[in-house]
Amino acid sequence: MEAEKKYITSEELKGHNKVGDLWISIQGKVYNVSDWVKEHPGGDVPILNLAGQDVTDAFIAYHPGTAWSYLDKFFTGFYLSDFKVSEVSRDYRKLASEFSKMGLFDTKGHVTSLTLASVAVMFLIVLYGVLRCTSVWAHLGSGMLLGLLWMQSAYVGHDSGHYVVMTNNGFNKLAQVLSGNCLTGISIAWWKWTHNAHHIACNSLDHDPDLQHMPVFAVSSQFFNSITSHFYGRKLEFDVFARFLIRYQHFTFYPVMCVARVNLYLQTILLLFSKRRVHDRALNIMGILVFWTWFPLLVSCLPNFGERVMFVLASFAVCSIQHIQFCLNHFAANVYVGSPSGNDWFEKQTCGTLDISCSSWMDWFFGGLQFQLEHHLFPRLPRCQLRKISPLVIDLCKKHNLPYRSLSFWEANRWTIRTLRTAALQARDLTNPAPKNLLWEAVNTHG
């Protein structure tokens, strides 16, 4: 039987990494997923980024045990002749297997039910504060509470995007659209598209959309080379306008975060009405329409324009804590340029993430995502399990001399601002010229 097996090398596998010719290796067996990429529940980006290499660790991280049975129909008949497993990967897979045997992936607790209940209560309080109270302080408090509601609702949407938080897939999709589209105005389809790419290419400057915020922010001077985003399919221009904004990014970071939701709303609309293939497009659009019905109506019930602006800004400002948190988890971590590799999954996740240390009673506030490394290594693990496995992840990092960084919320802010300030000072270096754009030319035209 061994003699009858057909083999290809890893170098030959690399040649199958183009649209229409996408091969991957899992446990040394080679699969052709060229057609499946269109139906892949996680979208096409993860497969496009990892095609042409062994993806065993990423497959284990993202798929339940039942997914293995679907692989046979994609088997090419080839095996990798030079298939090897590193010690880090061996230990990672062993840990994932132990968690599965312990039932950690299936033990979800009552986090989702409690969170949804708290969201419902907060929504009722917000409605009461706006519709029944006349005090400006009640209206301010209602706006702030709405921001907290958006944070908690987003955590449910995040969890339901990684694993089934409800009793079945149908209710899980309902939870996604309700907690994401209907309550926050941010499409779960947009979130899946960007978030899966982020996980696969964690902190790759040209593949991870969560780091591509030009011309407003640049976490590394490598962006000054106008690198091409493989996610958006366009060049991230570092021109004079970008240089001007980035020069002061350590000052503008928090103000921009306070209105960052506006960008998320725009990104949602651009995706849903684009030519790109979107799963459940109609359902996502319906959910967005629900949000853009109740939210403007609620704001319009406030007595005057000033209070309406105050209400919206208060809700945005409170919710900005969540946007800041997501930045803290990655902005100050290690970055790289290039496509992700399936052979160093564990190493890339440890280098590209920062944890935020806090007491267990604050887990609800951070949605479990303060354990960012644990979440990136085991994205299907319910948030109630992340604190339990943290010591095991720390031990594994120590064993292989890999970074495990856990900072207080304030220290993580300091690291992030320091990273932004370093890049800002480099952007001020006039010896590094940036091409002028049309806006700059228009502003500086004389005569």
Image (cartoon, helix red, strand yellow):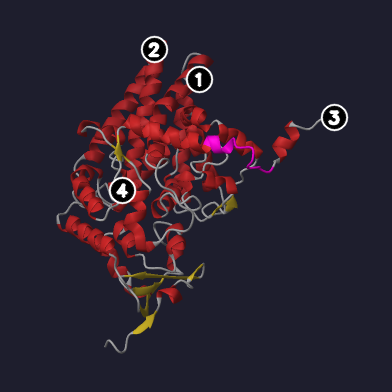
Indicate the amino acid at tag 1: Val
Name the mark on residue 309: 1
Name the mark on residue 447: 3
Q: Who comes first in sequence, dot 3 or dot 1?
A: 1
Q: Who comes first in sequence, dot 4 or dot 1?
A: 1
Q: Per the image, is 442 magenta?
A: no
Q: Is residue 131 visible?
A: no
In this image, 363 relative to 131: left or right?
left
Residue sticking out furthest to the left: 102
Q: Who comes first in sequence, dot 3 or dot 4?
A: 4
Say if 52 sits above or below 7 in the image: above
Q: Single out the mark in the foreground, 3 or 4.
A: 4
Q: Who comes first in sequence, dot 3 or dot 2?
A: 2
Q: Can you say which quadrant of the picture contains the C terminus? A: top right
Q: Per the image, is 434 magenta?
A: yes
Q: Single out the mark in the foreground, 3 or 1.
A: 3
What is the secondary structure assignment of the residue under circle 4? loop
Q: Who comes first in sequence, dot 4 or dot 2?
A: 2
Q: Which residue lies at the image location 52% right of the left edge and 67% below the top edge?
A: 19
Quote the CA–CA distance across marks 1 and 2.
14 Å
Q: Are circles 4 and 2 on residues that touch, CB within 8 Å?
A: no
Name the mark on residue 403: 4
